[in-house]
Image (cartoon, helix red, strand yellow):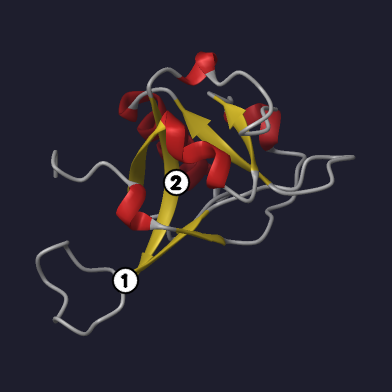
Amino acid sequence: MLRPGVDDLAPLGRYIHLLVIQRPNKPAWKPGPRERIEWRVVTVLPSGADRPAAPAFSSLVKAVKFLQAAFLAGTIKDVNKVGKFPQDAAPDFPFDLIPNPELDSLQSAPLGPLVTVDQTRAISQEE
């Protein structure tokens, strides 16, 4: 587990991909001018940890592979986006990061709270 702002995040590379539930579930160009978009990150509660931790991936491919396995296992539901953040946004995250986890390694950890993140810090020009 990595604590942003304390630990070296090199295992994740330049970008961090997080599993996100966006509400409302609409494409970026669809919400109205006053409609508020909220991004909430999926977390788990690792045994003995003092705060939640989010599965974090070094690539979109790794995030999607994990997410597909989690959906099929019924472990994680409702995720509708993989948010891509620059590594320098990580110190602001109110959770630890679990770099490139395998689903089996998280099966025993209960799901934690959904934690709101600032989606304006995400990389969006590639959408």
Q: Which mark is residue 78?
A: none
Classify mark 2: residues with Cα within 10 Å, few (<14), some (14-19) or many (20+): many
**In which quadrant of the rendered image does the N terminus lie?**
top right
Q: Is residue 80 visible?
A: no
Q: Most extreme residue toward the bottom, as rendered?
A: 34
Task: Tell me how far mark 1 sits from mark 2, CA to CA.
Answer: 16 Å
Q: Check disc 2 and report its element: helix, strand or loop.
A: strand
Upstream in sequence: badge 1 or badge 2: 2
Residue 56, image x and y in percent? 51, 33
Judging by the rendered image, the residue that carries numbered circle 1 is: 37
Q: Classify residue 14 as left or right of residue 94.
A: left
Q: Most extreme residue toward the right, as rendered?
A: 48
Q: Quadrant of residue 112?
A: bottom right
Classify mark 1: residues with Cα within 10 Å, few (<14), some (14-19) or many (20+): some
Q: Check disc 1 and report its element: helix, strand or loop.
A: loop
Residue 75, image x and y in percent? 58, 49
